[in-house]
Amino acid sequence: MLLLLLLLLLVLLLALAARWRASWSNSHWRRRGICGPQGCPLLGNMALFALGQRSYGEVYAQIYREHPGLRYVGFYRLFNEPALLVRDERLLREVLVGSSFACCADNAVNVDAQRDVLASCNPFIASGDRWRKLRADLVPLFTPSRLRQTLPHVAAACQQLRPFVERRLIRERFEAKALATRYTLQVIASAAFGLDAHCLCQDEQQEQGSEWLEWLVPLFQPSAWSLPETIALLHSSRLASILQHRYVPLSLQHWLCDLVRTSASANSFLRWLGEQQGSDLAGHATTLLLEGYETSAMLLAFALYELSLNESVQRRVHAELTEVAKRHGGLLLGHAALAELRYAEATLLETLRLHPAMQALQKRCTKSFTLPAQRWDTDTETDSSLQVALGTVLVLPVQAIHLDPQLYAEPLKFQPERFMDASPGLGCRFLAFGAGPRMCPGMRLGLAQTKAALVTLLQDYSVHLADQRQPPVQVSPLTFLTASKQGIWLQLRKR
Ligand code: HEM
Ligand SMILES: *[C@@H]1O[C@H](CO)[C@@H](O)[C@H](O)[C@H]1NC(C)=O
């Protein structure tokens, strides 16, 4: 009896201590005079995300919307980690491109270099000098002249896409992301390794045993493990080691290393990398593959979806490609023709505005620096400025910025015209590729391969919803890269 009572007392004390600790860490920002939402114990302001109800992008978007008067908001990520959500365009610029870049250049992701050997060679994941070196290895692959040398791989995949669609999809409803993934895998296998991935075979017999489809299609798909993996990746290195999570599963790692050993045909990324001294081939191959297919496939799928929703945009894309094809003897896949397809490109940028692959960028402060006063209406006096502590995560809420009516009028409307005259690189209001020294080096290639497939499909077909009554596509709340919950179901009709 006494024992039971003691036990009860102990539990009570522990609960009180936990509660006190929670409220203490919850007062982190209050004690520093920084405004922001109250967090709950343990889950901070991310309860809906932790429960699998909202994507992290939506959670950040709500915090963004609820604090219009502030340049940045003090809030709590999971496990009560104090973090700052940056709202002001000038500050975003400062952090990504300007003088504060050097103080928060690292992405806040938890990947264990010992456990996840290949993934940790990704510049997105690496930090400090290692990042600089890895990025410097890759950047020469994406110069305009290398892009031109890469385009034949893109054109070849488009040439396979045509009969594939003709034979296997026409008049049937299909899942756009699945089709798009086949295509981007076909491109990247060819461009990076010089290999035929057998993802766009005309009959199903031939594609039997396409290891590319088998290994890589499920990798980014929402599953029962997605949420704990996303939480581990973004919020907790401890959880990551408990789960023994690997971004690149061990079996995939072996398969990739074999691929790298056995292939490096001329005019492929691997061959070009091989000509450089001392670069880690297997690591770079992994980066090119994983970065190369998923984001572009999602972009292609969402672009087809948006076109099926908005007839007037689709008509304009059709009109443009007819006109450009006329000028180029019916061929759209050369460098010059692709460059002339400006409305198609604007359509892709507008798609990324509404559906950015990364809903937020999250940077970690590696050297303390100062932010100006939190409120717009206060001047930058030193006494109301904030000294950002080492290790603090700065959230740059990409999705929230892209949907801010102050930055984009009628933000929910799909209007590629927004991108027809403004260059998206200007300012930090378009962040689908990030900005500054860490900006996506594959942007041109990603846009080119997606655009090539888009116009290849639209040259022959118009695209429609599979079912006019289907509910709008929902974004999975579980994944790190934007994915749809139930798939994107569409139908093609011959033009
Ligand atoms: C539409 C397609 C793509 C989108 C939306 C996209 C988006 C992004 C974003 C948001 C980042 C993070 C930027 C930051 O940390 O500030 C990034 C980084 C990166 N991307 Fe892409 N990307 C795309 C295609 C590609 C392609 C095709 C490749 C290469 C084959 C590529 C290679 C990389 C690499 C290596 C990084 C890390 C850069 C660094 O940290 O220095 N991306 N991408
Ligand atoms: C469809 O596209 C047109 C042209 O960009 C645009 O004006 C209109 O607002 C779009 N409609 C919707 C519902 O997004």
Image (cartoon, rainbow, N blue to C red):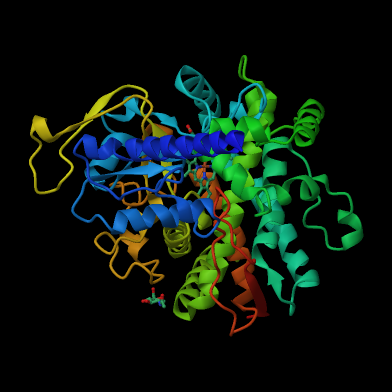
Count of labels shown? 0
Residue pictured at 44% horizontal, 53% vertical = 57
Q: Determine if residue 205 is in view.
A: yes
Taking 171 as reference, is 400 left or right? left
Q: Position of residue 474 (x, y in %)?
A: 54, 67
The quadrant in which residue 450 appears is: bottom right
131 left or right of 152 in image = left
Ligand 2 quarter of the rendering: bottom left
Q: Is any part of residue 356 visible from this angle?
A: no
Quadrant where the C terminus sits is bottom right
**Which residue appears at 58% of the width and 57% of the height?**
483
Residue at 27% from the left image edge and 32% from the top image edge: 98
Q: Looking at the picture, how far across and down is residue 223, in whole percent? A: 68, 53
- Residue closer to the observer: 226 or 3: 3
Dividing the picture into quadrants, the one containing residue 33 is top left
77 w.r.t. 106: above or below: below
**With 91 as the anchor, is 161 left or right in this view?**
right
- The quarter holding residue 111 reads top right
Side (left or right) of 40 relative to 154: left
- Viewer-proximal residue, 270 or 22? 22
Tell me residue 479's x, y (percent).
58, 51
Q: Residue at x 58, y 53 (%)?
A: 478
For this orientation, the residue located farthest to the right is 205
Establish if 163 lies above or below 35: below
Percent x, y of residue 200: 77, 57
Residue nearer the viewer, 248 or 74: 74
Quadrant occupied by the N terminus? top right
